[in-house]
Amino acid sequence: MTIRVAHLYPEYLNIYADRGNIAVLTSRARWRGIELEVAPVGLGDELRPGAHDLLYIGGGQDREQSLISPDLAARGEAIREAVGGGAVVLAVCGGYQLLGRFYRGRDGEELPGAGLFPLETVAGERRMIGDCLLECELEPGVRQTLAGFENHAGVTKLDSGAEPLGRVVAGFGNDGESGFEGVRVRNAIGTYLHGPLLPRNAWLADWILERALEHRTGEPHELDPLADDLEASAHTVASARARSRGGRY
Amino acid sequence: MPLSVGIAGARMAAGLSRLVGAGGGTTVPGKVLTSIDPDVLDRLAARLPLGSALISATNGKTTTAAMAAQVLAPRVRLAHNSSGANLLSGVTSSLLSAKGAELGLFEVDEAALGEVAARVRPRAVCLGNLFRDQLDRYGELEHVAERWRLVVRGLAPEAVLVVNGDDPQVGDLARERAGSVVFGLDDPRHAVPELLHAADSKWCLRCGHPYEYSAVYVGHLGAYRCPACGHARPDLDIVARQIELRGLDGVDFSLEAQGERRAVRLAVPGLYNVYNALGAASLALALGSALDDVVSGLERFGAAFGRFERIAVGDRRVLVLLVKNPAGANEAVRTLVAGGAPPIAVLALNDEIADGRDVSWIWDVDWEPLLAGLERVVVTGARAAEMALRCKYGGFPTDAIEVVPDLGAALDCGLELSPPGGELVVLPTYTAMLALRRIVADRGFVRPYWERAA
């Protein structure tokens, strides 16, 4: 079994150790006998809806983001179609912002987004930096926590009725005031949390793999559990950091 | 209040800080005096008869400054912040404690360069490199580069600017001032095949097109040219050629400057130390040193503390290499692997402000070549579990990973795993390095850093 992954603009968007997320997905799939086939998608490369089970897009510095933003915006329809067909998306930080409608910088310059996520982002006065802890309920009745690190000047506002990825337990989140962090549209997830996100939040890595397998096969999948002692211990430390150091409401 | 009264009070604070065991007193007196008199640094610096020289870079500023100190110290009395206290307070403190100093030689934090330069009014500034580092603290690379450009524009007319031409962002600053000195490497035999994962500054400063490199030496440092607009490495004034790596023992190269050529044998290894030596040599020459004094100073240089420092602990040796960002850690790994690293390593990851709160950088480091040669890894520090995960997802077997968050216990564990007469590699982040040195010092194996001023 193979999960087909499109990694968008890895040459440009890789600032917060995004390859750590890919490494975690690859290993955790392999340990269950599943291959992850990761195809880099650069400027101008083809991205066909349905050809990939998972789209990954990371974060970059302002300069890199402005270099890829027109190319990404032009793929908006293809990405929305892919997600409509059940493909999984994990978008982190800059990639998260640029899958919204637009990102407006401090100088007023507006980068167009892909319009997948019902949100828009405007650069604010302060940077929101620190450990962050969320409570999520991706499956009804199953509450889990996500521990990560956020570092963004962008203030992201979700459209009313849009579903956040989680509620902020400690930290700033999307805008430092709503108590929401990230966004979810079907199997597409956007978040400011890096660190990278997946090593210390193994449950989310497995959720992504299960949904990607479902997209691949058309049937629900439940992965066998792994020995995650180190992951749990890193999660505990990072959660404690967020509780003691994260931004406050 | 007269400056002398404030100085007496601040020196007393330094003594108190050491007495209560709060540290080396390397920043406390500066903080005390600055709170009494905010312009104190300006006045202290103005008293130096030979003025000041500043060194900044993401990586290598402590080593470059220590190398320059070796060159300069025989002929000039220095005020030098050799302990690495490189903010305004640290520079002020080192000026306070250096009685009768003639020349100030200061490494300066990248983000503090503007304020220190405005107060010290340096006669020479050496800028080494800009890599992504502690994004939670410094912000993005471009912003640091822009602040440096403003610093360069604000320098006194007679000041000399020394830059590493192999770094696109830094080398371009030479175009701001006539008479700038540009250094760089020229030995394509040591080029790496391609830019590593964590490479920064890949895109042309002027037009955004990817640079073409005829040689990449360290990170994004090398001989670059933009095929679209022609922006390229400036001509080199001071060059290292014929580089011969001597494993973990050192590196030889030919130093070419002022139309002359000298063979240099460094006692510290790695291409990145050739860059540090070039920066130190260029700065010392700009300050008027003779080329032969430069060579003998570089060859006398041992290691700055925690930077490839070897410490004997009983019948074993500990090799300490500070790691703090992807570019520096990649070079540490490359040098260790090329030089034949021992089979046991301690990786110490803390997340204090000086280390960077955000530990994601460890995932941008290519640890795999080092891990491939290791039998066991001891991970330690406040974020030991995170480091363990990095090893695990780097393909290292989990049953060969020892998670020992306490630094002292981790050191013991590593030493125990190393054979008698063997060597243990310790790769700590900044505060872990300070803590480890304290532990080793408490056991009587090394003097505390504040007693070791060059």
Image (cartoon, rainbow, N blue to C red):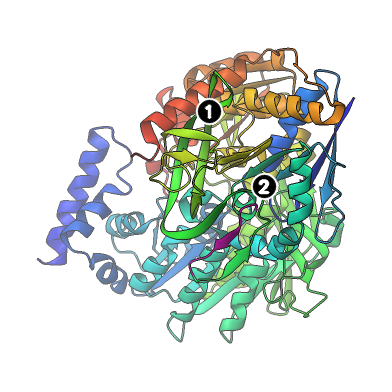
Residue B349, horizontal then vertical, whole percent: 54, 32
B399 vs A129: above or below = above
Residue farthest along the right direction in this orientation: A1
Residue farthest along the left direction in this orientation: B1
Give the amino acid at mark 1: Cys
Q: Residues within 10 Å of mark 2 (few under 14, many from 20)?
A: many
Q: Is residue B298 left or right of residue A244?
A: right
Quadrant for the N terminus of chain B, please: bottom left
B451 vs B90: above or below = above
Which residue is drawn at the image coordinates 72% and 27% (left, top)?
A: B393
Residue at mark 2: A58
- How would you classify the magenta stretch by its main secondary structure? loop
Q: Residues within 10 Å of mark 1 (few under 14, many from 20)?
A: some
Toward the viewer: B386 or B44? B386
Calculate the distance from the C-alpha at mark 1 to the C-alpha at mark 2: 21 Å
Q: What is the span of residues highlighted in magenta in the rendered image?
A: A99-106
Q: Is residue B298 left or right of residue B223?
A: left
- Marks 1/2 in contact by CB < 8 Å: the verdict is no
